[in-house]
Amino acid sequence: MSHPRYLLLPLNLITITLALLSQRSQAQLSPSFYDCTCSDVSAIVRSTVQQAQTSDPRIYASLTRLFFHDCFVQGCDGSILLVDSSTIQSEQDARPNKNSARGFNVIDDIKTAVENACPGVVSCADILALAAEASVNLAGGPSWTVLLGRRDSTTANFTAAGNLPGPFDNLTTLQKKFSDVGLHDIDLVTLSGAHTFGRGQCQFFSNSRLYNFNGTGKPDPTLNSTYRTILEQNCPQGGTDRS
């Protein structure tokens, strides 16, 4: 399958940043962690992700984003996968994730397939990390060596999940949020650019960029005119479609 050249640069940069995010979450991880206990785990994950894409073309982007939203909150520990209970307020219900984060069903499918092959061995946190790597690679980006051996979190952090980088944060706020988790301006630019990969919601940019930039009643003059026309067709002024 061929992939547009404009897609490959963001995906290459995403690879570097996601690899750094996943490696900083826990020490003493190893790519060979499951070699003796579940040697086919990477192949199982990749196959399941690839199969999911046949019915859900957005899934590669969704799983990549899901991994980022997990890692940005207390590390890549799978805490975003935890649901509400008597002791847990799920990160899935935090504003940046609610009705937005997706791909949980595919992670469940992967977990089932992995459990059938290697019961009680592979953590959900590692499954999510492997799914993100497979997604970037299958979408036309490079691969990276996924360090494995994470333990699943038994707690969620609803408050921190509510503080994920947002579409209306200014540059100073974004820089502070990234700095707080050990990331820098290059990582910020990379992960902002990652929004060219996947699907965006019209509500977050149509009025401010297409129709009323800085209150002028005109489009953002820095937008490429051809690209702007495409966006206007997909996000008509006053439209109710969210994406």
Image (cartoon, grey):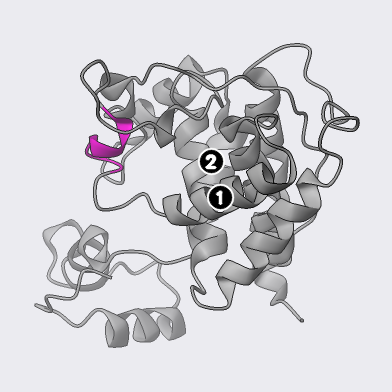
Of residues 68 and 125, the one drawn nearer to the viewer in this rendering: 125
- Is residue 6 visible in the rendered image? The answer is yes
Asked if the residues shown at circle 1 and circle 2 are in contact, with their CB atoms under 8 angstroms apart, the answer is: yes
| Residue 37 on the magenta segment | no
Residue 130, x across and y down, in percent: 69, 43
Name the element at disc 2: helix
Crowding around mark 2 (Cα neighbors within 10 Å: few <14, some 14 to 19, many 20+) is: many
Residue 239, numbered label: none
- Is residue 197 visible in the rendered image? The answer is no
Residue 163, x across and y down, in percent: 30, 27
Task: List the residue tagged with mark 2.
Answer: 67
Distance, label 1 to label 2, CA atoms, is 5 Å
Above or below: residue 243 compared with residue 83: below
* Type of the residue with mark 1: Thr
Q: Is residue 78 left or right of residue 94?
A: right
Crowding around mark 1 (Cα neighbors within 10 Å: few <14, some 14 to 19, many 20+) is: many
Residue 232, x across and y down, in percent: 28, 82
Q: Is residue 198 left or right of residue 201?
A: right
Above or below: residue 186 compared with residue 184: below
Name the element at disc 1: helix
Q: Is residue 186 left or right of residue 163?
A: right
Q: Please tell me how many numbered marks the rendered image carries.
A: 2
Q: Which residues are magenta?
A: 90-97
Of residues 126 and 164, the one drawn nearer to the viewer in this rendering: 126
Task: List the residue tagged with mark 1.
Answer: 64
Secondary structure mostly seen in the magenta stretch: loop
Residue at image point 71% right, 45% down: 15
Residue 58, x across and y down, in percent: 49, 68
* Type of the residue with mark 2: Phe
Q: Quadrant of the C terminus?
A: bottom left
Residue at image point 90% right, 30% down: 36
| Residue 94 on the magenta segment | yes
